[in-house]
Image (cartoon, rainbow, N blue to C red):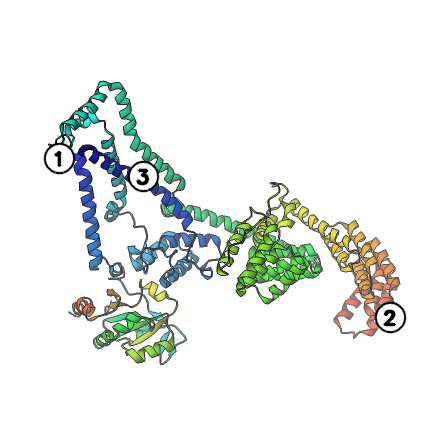
């Protein structure tokens, strides 16, 4: 091999390697996005508002950790980085813009705190250097691919005295070949010159597809706009949620014994983050629903959320109760796994979580979270991550999403999602949702016709949707389930006071006749008998019953006053 | 000689020169980023309000640490009992304390640890305040402890030194500035 071809091939190899590196660069940049998933930020640092938190993360990614120097404070575990992250969040809470925050920190630490230096005269060279280098590269490549004829006159290899005769001959032959076919060589010149541009274009395309225009490269003003917009949207959503909550509160005031209204209150309270209201409403709903395990697991979740993600004793008790009665309850299983995880029983956590996976749709957010959680627990337990089998989504049915909700309702993400879906429903949609809930309740109660309180609940539920006929039917069914005088009294009270109609008055009359003599002599029975007489138009009889009661209670008691007012009204 | 041959060689040479200059200056310590000029220099020193350490205890309310200091320049030293270089610089601070008052900011420290530290290495400070959440340090642009600031009588930051104080820093950084001020 002679010297000239040797040098040429070396140069070609260098150029090609260089350009392949340039070509691969954007791919590496693109991979950075996925590599970024590991971050140093701890849970207690995070802001509750997801949008502010996102801004905090963005800003942190642009600030240098001054201890580790080539890491952003978002990536660094150094104590100063933690403090700075907290400072950034404090600034955000005091409603400073991104620019102001960068400026405030720059005033303390100098420009060095910014990971990407600002574009100004002293940094022009820094910012332009890559462009200059690329231009030089393009120039060199064009030069390399230039046809031999154009460069024959000044070829460095031709002047070398050491080049021997044979090689001189061969060079001549090579040079002569293109000259003899000029039109063909011109077109191939074009191809040669366009090669570097093609490489550049491909690099650019790869960068645009895989690059990260989301972070530092995007101008700050542009982000401010987006931030303002998302803030506004969030505010609107919060206002809507607050309205829903207030409405639910009103509904509860009207029908405090209605399962639906309590449940709605809990749902809307959770949306605005009123955790105490949510817990109270869920407790009431649990009572009204006769310890429905689904509500129980929701309550357990609310307790956990109240304790900032720690599974409390109360929650733990509820969870084990739910798992006993409803072993497929995803929410309870998730919380159970979490409890084990927090206790340090990693294997148990893995097993519990794993047992929930067959009920979780594989395309849900929860599936992703569950996979990550299980992997983490398995790693901590030093066991292999088990194979997980998630439920396959049946068919895409966007339209009857609402109907699908009860099936997937038992996980926290889906729970949140359902709440937002609920508030986004139209009035008709909400009504439909409630009706479906009631239908489910009705089915359950019909399965156990001896469940007295179940029937009363159902009656309550029907009251909330003003289905009078069904209320009466439910009460009739309840009367068949009565096993004690106490229940009978409750039923009579419900018929006469909560839902007084002709049919229920008749029902009350029948039930009163069945009461034992001792109970009939009690004041509450007398009161109800009076009320029945009043409803049937027999005021005299009513006055007699109520006056009877007055004789037995002290005249200054609250009840006596009320009763006297009633009697006055009758007269 | 031809351009095609010279160009790559010269580009390589330029890059090699640039990187070796960068490398040499880095190794010489001239590019120590922690010694970059603080933007606070020439500006009013940030406030120094904090809970104060005295006799094993800390005050309940936040007080101005500079209040007890007589007129004239003073030093602000960020330190902690858990920091090793702070132990090394203690004798030099002791020396400096003969010339000007020093305010110590105990960075993320505890009163009981601090009292042990002062007992062992001496107490050159006129006043010690706690910076438990690191906010004062951030406000002063502190990279890490120990870090020392020289403040003029007018309350303007004159100099900053990151890292421990030694004879050399007293000679080359603090004393020239101090003499300049006192002229």
Q: Nearer the viewer, residue B50 or A139?
A: A139
Expressed as whole percent of the image width and height from the top left, the position of residue A402 reads 64, 46
What is the secondary structure assignment of the residue under circle 3?
A: helix
Q: CA distance from mark 2 to mark 1?
A: 125 Å
Q: Residue at x 31, y 39 (%)?
A: A20
Mark 2, Cα crowd under 10 Å, few <14 / some 14-19 / many 20+, is few
Quadrant in the picture for residue A262: bottom right
Which residue carries the number 3 mark?
Answer: A20
On the rendered structure, is A143 left or right of A222?
left
Asked where in the image residue A173 lies, by quadrant, the reply is top left
* Residue A396 versus residue A308 in the image, above or below: above
Q: Given the image, what chain letter belongs to the residue carrying mark 2?
A: A
Quadrant containing the N terminus of chain B in the rendered view:
top left
Question: From mark 3 to mark 2, how far is it between C-alphas?
Answer: 99 Å
Q: Which residue appears farthest toward the left when viewing the image?
A: A161
Q: Which residue is mark 2?
A: A518
Estimate the spatial distance between the alpha carbons at disc 1 and disc 3, rounded to whole Å. Answer: 28 Å
Give the class, few, some or many, for how many residues have Cα within 10 Å of label 1's Cα (few <14, many ≥20): few
Viewer-proximal residue, A226 or A338?
Answer: A338
* Residue A9 visible (yes or no): yes
N-term mark: 3 or 2: 3
Q: Secondary structure at mark 2?
A: helix
Q: Same chain for marks 3 and 2? A: yes
In percent of width and height, residue A360 lies at 59, 50
Residue that carries the numbered disc 1 in the rendered image:
B1
Q: Position of residue A384 (x, y in %)?
A: 51, 55
């Amino acid at each position: 091999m002679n010297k000239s071809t040797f040098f040429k091939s070396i140069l070609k190899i260098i150029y090609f390697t260089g350009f392949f590196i340039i070509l691969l660069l954007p791919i590496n940049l693109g991979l950075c996005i996925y590599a970024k998933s590991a971050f140093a930020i701890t849970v207690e640092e995070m802001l509750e508002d997801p949008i502010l938190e996102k801004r905090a993360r963005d800003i942190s990614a642009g600030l240098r950790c001054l201890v580790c120097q080539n890491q952003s404070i978002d990536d660094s575990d150094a104590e100063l980085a933690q403090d700075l992250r907290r400072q950034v969040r404090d600034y955000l809470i005091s409603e400073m813009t991104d620019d102001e925050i960068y400026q405030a920190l720059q005033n303390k630490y100098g420009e060095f705190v910014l990971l990407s230096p600002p574009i100004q005269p002293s940094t022009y060279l820094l910012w332009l250097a890559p462009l200059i280098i690329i231009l030089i590269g393009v120039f060199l490549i064009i030069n390399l691919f230039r046809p031999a004829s154009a460069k024959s006159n000044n070829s460095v290899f031709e002047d070398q005295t050491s080049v021997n005769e044979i090689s001189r001959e061969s060079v001549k032959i090579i040079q002569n070949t293109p000259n003899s076919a000029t039109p063909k060589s011109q077109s191939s010149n074009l191809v040669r010159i366009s090669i570097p541009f093609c490489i550049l274009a491909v690099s650019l395309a790869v960068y645009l597809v895989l690059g990260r225009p989301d972070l530092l490269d995007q101008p700050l003003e542009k982000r401010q706009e987006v931030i303002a917009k998302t803030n506004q949207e969030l505010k609107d959503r919060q206002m809507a949620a607050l309205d829903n909550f207030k409405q639910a509160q009103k509904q509860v005031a009207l029908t405090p014994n209605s399962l639906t209204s309590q449940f709605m209150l809990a749902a809307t309270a959770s949306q605005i983050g009123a955790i105490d209201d949510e817990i109270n409403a869920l407790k009431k709903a649990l009572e009204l629903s006769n310890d429905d395990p689904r509500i129980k697991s929701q309550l357990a979740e609310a307790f956990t959320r109240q304790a900032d993600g720690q599974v409390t004793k109360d929650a733990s008790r509820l969870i084990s109760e739910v798992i006993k009665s409803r072993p497929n309850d995803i929410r309870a299983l998730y919380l159970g796994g979490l409890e084990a995880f927090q206790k340090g029983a990693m294997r148990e956590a893995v097993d519990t979580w794993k047992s929930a996976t067959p009920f979780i749709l594989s395309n849900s957010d929860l599936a992703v979270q569950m996979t990550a959680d299980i992997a983490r627990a398995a790693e901590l337990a030093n066991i292999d991550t088990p194979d997980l089998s998630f439920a396959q989504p049946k068919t895409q049915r966007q339209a009857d999403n609402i109907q699908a909700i009860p099936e997937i309702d038992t996980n926290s993400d889906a729970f949140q999602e359902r709440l937002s879906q609920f508030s986004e429903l139209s009035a008709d949609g909400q009504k439909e949702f409630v009706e479906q809930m009631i239908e489910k309740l009705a089915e359950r109660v019909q399965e156990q016709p001896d469940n007295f309180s179940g029937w009363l609940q159902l009656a309550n539920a029907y009251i909330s949707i003003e289905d009078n006929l069904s209320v009466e039917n439910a009460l009739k069914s309840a009367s068949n389930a009565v096993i004690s005088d106490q229940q009978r009294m409750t039923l009579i009270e419900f018929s006469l006071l909560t839902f007084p109609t002709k049919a229920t008055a008749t029902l009350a009359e029948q039930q009163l006749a069945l009461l034992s003599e001792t109970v009939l002599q009690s004041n509450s029975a007398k009161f109800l008998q009076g009320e029945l007489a009043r409803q049937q138009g027999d005021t005299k009889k009513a006055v007699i019953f109520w006056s009877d009661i007055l004789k037995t209670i002290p005249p200054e008691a609250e009840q006596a006053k009320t009763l006297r007012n009633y009697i006055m009204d009758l007269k | 000689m031809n351009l095609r041959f010279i160009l790559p060689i010269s580009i390589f040479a330029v890059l090699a020169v640039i990187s070796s200059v960068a490398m040499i200056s880095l190794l010489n310590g001239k590019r120590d980023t922690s010694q970059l000029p603080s933007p606070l220099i020439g500006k009013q020193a940030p406030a120094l309000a904090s809970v104060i350490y005295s006799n094993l205890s800390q005050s309940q309310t936040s007080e101005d640490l500079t209040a007890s200091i007589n007129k004239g320049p003073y030093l602000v030293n960020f330190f902690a009992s858990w920091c090793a270089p702070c132990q090394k610089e203690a004798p030099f601070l002791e020396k400096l304390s003969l010339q000007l008052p020093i305010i110590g900011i105990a960075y993320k420290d505890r009163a009981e640890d601090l009292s042990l530290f002062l007992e062992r290495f001496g107490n050159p400070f006129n006043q010690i305040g706690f910076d438990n959440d690191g906010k004062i340090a951030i406000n002063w642009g502190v990279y890490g402890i120990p870090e020392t600031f020289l403040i003029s009588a007018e309350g303007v930051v004159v100099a900053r030194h990151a890292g421990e104080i030694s004879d050399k820093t007293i000679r080359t950084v603090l004393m020239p500035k101090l003499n300049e001020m006192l002229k």
